[in-house]
Amino acid sequence: MFFRMITGAFRRQWKKMLMIALTVALGASIATAMLNVMLDVGDKINEELKAYGSNITVVPNSQAVMSDLYAVEETETKDEFLKEETLGEFLTIFWANNITDFAPVLDTSVNVNGNDIQLIGTWFDHHFEFKKKGTVYQRDTGIINLRSWWDITDGKWMDEAKLSGDQYAMTGRKTADMLGVSAGDRITVKSSKGTEELEIVGIFESGDDEEDCIFTTLSVAQRLSGAEGKYKKAEVSAITSPDDELAVKAAKNPDLLSGDEYDLWYCTAYVSSICFQIQEAIPEASARAVRQIADSEGKILEKTELLMALITLMSLIGATLGISNLVTSSVMERSAELALMKAVGAKNGQITFLVLTEIVLTSILGAAAGYFMGYAFAQVIGQSVFSSAIEMSGMAAFLVMVLIIAVTLVGSIPAVRMILRLRPSEVLHGGH
Amino acid sequence: MKLLELKDVTKRYGSLYALDKVSLSIDKGEWIAIMGPSGSGKSTMMNIISCMDRPTEGQVIFNGRDITKDSRKKLTEFHRDKIGLVFQQFHLINYLNAVENVMVAQYYHSMPDEKEALEALERVGLKDRAKHLPSQLSGGEQQRVCIARALINSPELILADEPTGNLDEANENIVLDLFRQLHKEGTSLIVVTHDPEVGEVAERVVRLEHGKIISDKKNNQFSE
Ligand SMILES: Nc1ncnc2c1ncn2[C@@H]1O[C@H](COP(=O)(O)OP(=O)(O)O)[C@@H](O)[C@H]1O
Ligand SMILES: [Mg+2]
């Protein structure tokens, strides 16, 4: 009976119910999109911040000056290089043990089947040996530890020790799709300096611009850019002590520190003191902390999240007002019917339950539709703003459901009050 | 035996006395017509008797118990168990068919029972119309569904407010025959009307004017 009454009411008031569902769907879609973007992008960036063991970049000195002057992250008008031997200095400095990983980067433009693509030469999982003053330093390192968030969707990580020769590559998902290649395929890479045939070992998803690149061994990139024995930049991952006042002071200009302060600073693993020591060991290089960039990114992210939370809140308030209007007018339209139910003995609670069940069911349907709209919306935002796909979280779905039910119930308050006030005597005998 | 007693019942709307110190006593099984011009307070009286409204002053005594001060919840239950209502505008739920409309009253009373609901429809001669929606029924048929609904929980008292107000002559007679039958079975009936023909067939006629009873007579022509 209850069921019949519900379905009957749906059939009779389908237009109004559709409006309610639409209102809810709209609110839910915005909430879904915003929450998912918030959770996913927040996670992703936090993960990257954590995973970005690469908290120091080392670039040629003159380039550092250029970048600082124009406040541009990377200026590559003139190519400047560092010698490959300098990489060994990372193992000789006082804080060598704090340096967990490092990898050289040498990028150049290449052409594959008529497509211009950025090619990056680096170490993947590289065994490195360095001799200095009779001591042999060695380390197994490479971007395998500096790109822990890469998702290998095809093939595997490149293990340089197990491969013969150096003509191998890993490509981003986007590049692989564009070239129509998969792991195991070979591609021919051309540059002004030569041609290389590379076998694709693995394809990765990174959620950032690197998906547009081809990663290959350093030696291949050196040949293709005519920069044998050189690299452009090194990414260094170091365990550091958190910055304090002393570190901030030192970061401005180490020369201003007093003798004791200088000693304390030099012997503490501040990112600035590690950078300083790298520069001491490699005079032609400039080492900079990249955490600052990440920190400001984090701040922008926080602000963006706040904005998204506000949009979510506004859309939910909007939905509440809309629902409140629609439900009230629906109850008004049905006042005779509801009064009749009271007249045949229905209690306030029973009628309220009946009406709320209808509304909540409608809302749930609307919310489900809104969820899928929100999914599409989230992908659009993800691609256009963060250029990465947004993973939908169950947490967000649950939250949206709870929020929508709360919104529906709150929006129904005026209607419920109307039901409670409804006097069968006035409604049923009215008009004569 | 007394079923219902109104003692000095007054209902005021602002300065308007819809009912003015009305006293009335009704026996079990009686069939009473309440007559009077429009605005004389008939519906107000119905609402008070059916517990859908409270008097401003005075007492309503049902089965020897003063129910004037009962809580709303208690009144709803009381009303549900003892009273069946018939309205001028029928007030059927238009998306439910005839038998479902009867079942609504069962649902809020106890348990819907389709067989019983069909029997009630049979009593009012509408068994073959059970699956029709109100919009597919004539006015007379709708009113009979309404009567079946009023009957379904075996009330002690049936209150009908202008039950024939929207009906033609033929349907009016069918409804009056039904009342006659209910009366024979011992159900108490209070029928509000301003139609003399409907008043004539009742056992007793109470006349209202400006919220006061101006006459209260047994009907000599009344026959069982
Ligand atoms: N809810 C109300 N508010 C104000 N006045 C009312 C209300 N209900 C009825 N009245 C007034 O009380 C008087 C009696 O009304 P009613 O009992 O409906 O008369 P009847 O049913 O005999 O036509 C009328 O003057 C009517 O306008
Ligand atoms: Mg009236």
Image (cartoon, rainbow, N blue to C red):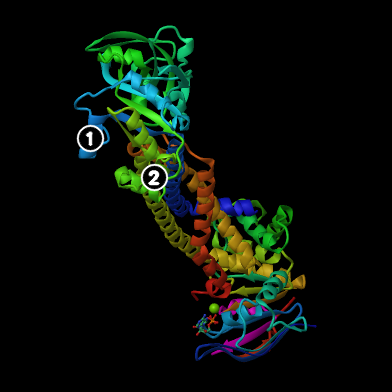
Asked if the residue at label 1 sits under 8 Å from ligand 1, the reply is: no
In the rendered image, which quarter is residue B75 located in?
Answer: bottom right
- Examine the image and state in which quarter residue B204 appears: bottom right
Q: Give A419 or B190, whichever is nearer the viewer.
A: A419
Q: Chain of mark 2?
A: A
In which chain is the residue bearing label 1?
Answer: A
Dot 1 or dot 2, earlier in sequence:
1
Tag 1 secondary structure = helix
Q: Is residue A102 left or right of residue A59?
A: right
Query: In the shown orientation, is residue A288 left or right of residue B113?
Result: left
Task: State the residue at coordinates (43%, 22%).
Answer: A142
Q: Position of residue A240 (x, y in %)?
A: 45, 39
Name the residue furthest front: A259
Which residues are the magenta region?
B194-212
10 Å crowding of disc 2: few (<14), some (14-19), many (20+): some
Residue under label 2, please give it.
Answer: A298
Amino acid carrying mark 2 in the image = Gly
Q: Is residue B211 magenta?
A: yes
Quarter location, residue B81: bottom right
Query: Looking at the picture, does residue B198 appear above or below residue A163?
Result: below
Point 19% across, 27% down: residue: A77
Q: Amino acid at mark 1?
A: Val
Whether residue B12 is visible: yes
Residue B130 visible in the displayed image: no
Where is residue A109 shown, x and y percent of the image? Answer: 26, 19
Q: CA distance from mark 1 to mark 2?
A: 25 Å
The residue singled out by tag 1 in the image is A65
The N terminus of chain B - image quarter: bottom right
